[in-house]
Amino acid sequence: MSSVLEKSLAIVELLVGHPAGLPVSAIAAATDQPASGVHRTLQELARLGYVRQLQSQGDYALTIRLPALGLGFLGRAGITDVAQPVLDQLAHDSGELIRMSVIDGDNLTWVAVAQGATRGLRYDPGQEQGVVVHLASSAGGKAWLASMSDEEALVRVGAQGLMRQADGQGQNAPRSLALLLEQLAEARARGYATAVDSYIAGMAAMAVPVRYHGDGAVLGCLSIAGPAVRMTAERMSELAPRLQQAAQELGATAPGSKFFQANVRALDALPERKRA
């Protein structure tokens, strides 16, 4: 890491995943920064209201200010306004976890969620809003990759990495580009992408792209996820029409979002070969 801003953002991103806080030594080790520099950065973030020190043990944690800014942005951009009712209804109909991701620059990022499983075995990650989607191992990522040419898909996977650098990845995550391309071809032919014991062990998901006005530029992806023992191939086939219908509904309401409008204008400005 070279810049002060890069180092500061690394600390903030780390603390997002640890709401109970972390000591300076742990933050320094995780971000590969000197403890003295981390302490100075934390003091400055605390002065600005983004971090607080937990007096009981001296750990540092984020304040609510940053999440509040994020929620405020999503609300003013109109993303949650147009998406949440559709997600809630799909969660009710499927009885599983529903997630929506949006294209943000070169990334796909989870922004909205609805849980339809109210009891018993369920998949409930709880902390994925704002997380950049790993493309090669997730259903949403593969749905986006399948919407583009193999050449563009390989470029995006090459930039991010074929394997997810995190604990818990399932044994079925594609470990070769050839296998990934086969899965993308299957997704195009089937009409939806799947990931079983791939992104996370024991979890299965299916996803489709969300297109502006239903058939325009890809804005993001919509997925249904649940325990692999319940989300079988047969059940995914049964859920596919309802998932595709919900994606169409989201695409139809997308013009009501300033964020989506801006994304479409940006895509229109790109050369044809670079559009998803």
Image (tube, rainbow, N blue to C red):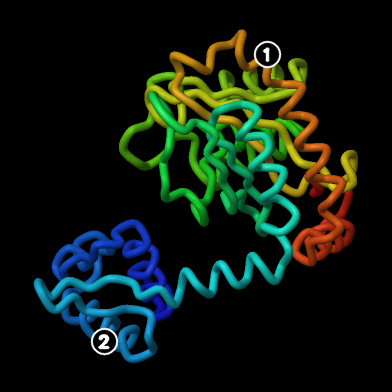
Horizontal side, residue 45 vs residue 105: left or right: left
* Residue type beneath disc 1: Ser
Tell me the residue at 86%/62% (across/down): 265
CB under 8 Å between callouts 2 and 1? no
**Residue 33 in sight here:** yes
Residue furthest top in the image: 234
Element under label 1? helix
Looking at the rendered structure, which numbered label has been put on residue 43? 2
Q: Residues within 10 Å of mark 2 (few under 14, many from 20)?
A: some
Quadrant in the rendering for residue 203: top left
| Callout in the foreground (2, 1) | 1
Tell me the residue at 21%/81% (across/down): 39
Residue wearing tag 1: 237
Quadrant in the rendering for residue 23: bottom left
* Most foreground residue, 234 or 43: 234
Q: How many numbered discs sit on the rendered protein?
A: 2
* Most foreground residue, 252 or 182: 252
Which quarter of the image is occupied by the N terminus? Answer: bottom left
Residue 112: x and y in percent read: 59, 50
Seen in the picture, residue 63 relative to 205 is either above or below; the reply is: below
Residue furthest bottom in the image: 47
Tell me the residue at 43%/79% (across/down): 5
